[in-house]
Image (tube, helix red, strand yellow):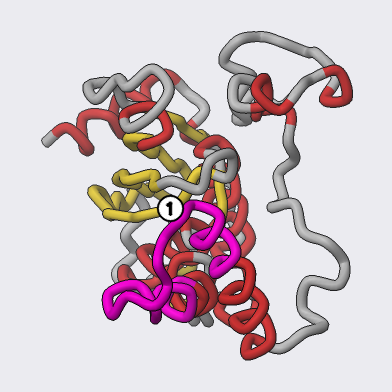
Amino acid sequence: MKTNEIMPLNGNNTSQSTLNHDDVGDNHMLTGMDTPMIPTAFLISDKEKKERIAFHFTEIMDTLGLDLNDDSLKGTPERVAKMYIEEIFSGLDPKNKPKIALFENKYQYEQMLVEKNITFYSNCEHHFVPIIGKAHIAYVSSGKVIGLSKLNRVVQYFAKRPQVQERLTNQIARELQKVLKTEDVAVIIDAKHLCVSSRGIKDDTSATVTAFYGGVFNTHEKIVELQNFISH
């Protein structure tokens, strides 16, 4: 494993095939860099996806014993379907990937640029409950610069899908390295997981921090400098 990739937090190298469903939440580093998708994911239209989701969510609500004839509930399956496709899981569809233009570094700024406190909302892929956090991004120009708002858009694109935080961190970093044509990218994410705070252990005070350090950021001095930037 490369030094700028995140090691499994528990050091567990157990094969995925030996895990039961309850174990997966504690071993999610075993999943890959890419979001798990089936090959036929985009063969049906968004309209059909919404219809299917609404149908199945109706079944879920009915199973829970909710009265779908109630004025407050009868439109819920369609609202959930629209929300899934157009909003909180819109990052699954490549057509929603932000288009990014680069500009010449005319200012000859050759130190790191940091965009901090980028608020994002994602969803845990194990329980489909929210992950709420902030992303901090840094890069050193290789001759090109990116519009600041585009950094936010890259974060939002990868956040708007079922996620685990480690993968989200790596996906943002790898995309920016590719776009900016430089290894000199760092991403730090500090987030609260509602699968921890609202269920299970019900710990509302803990937070999860993940980091990716590429290129020049793989030195102790640069990491400290970046952390100082973020803390001010």
Residue ID for mark 1: 122
Residue 146 visible, this orientation:
no
| 2 is higher (above) or lower (below) than 72 | above
Q: Which residues are magenta?
A: 57-80
Q: Position of residue 86 (x, y in %)?
A: 48, 79
| 48 is higher (above) or lower (below) than 118 | below
Q: Position of residue 187 (x, y in %)?
A: 44, 42
Q: Residue at x 48, y 69 (%)?
A: 144
| 45 is higher (above) or lower (below) than 35 | below
Res 105 quadrant in image: bottom left
Please state, as top left, top right, bottom left or bottom right, where the C terminus lies in the image: top left
Q: Nearer the viewer, residue 218 or 193?
A: 193
Q: Nearer the viewer, residue 187 or 131?
A: 131
Other residues around mark 1 within 10 Å, as few (<14) / some (14–19) / many (≥20):
many
Q: Residue at x 71, y 44 (%)?
A: 33
Describe residue 32's horizontal placement relative to residue 225 as left or right: right
Q: Nearer the viewer, residue 55 or 70?
A: 70
Q: Position of residue 127 (x, y in %)?
A: 53, 41
Q: Position of residue 64 (x, y in %)?
A: 49, 52
Q: Is residue 227 magenta?
A: no
- Look at label 1 and name its amino acid: Ser
Q: Residue at x 58, y 45 (%)?
A: 125
Describe residue 231's horizontal placement relative to residue 223 as left or right: left
Q: Nearer the viewer, residue 27 or 101?
A: 27
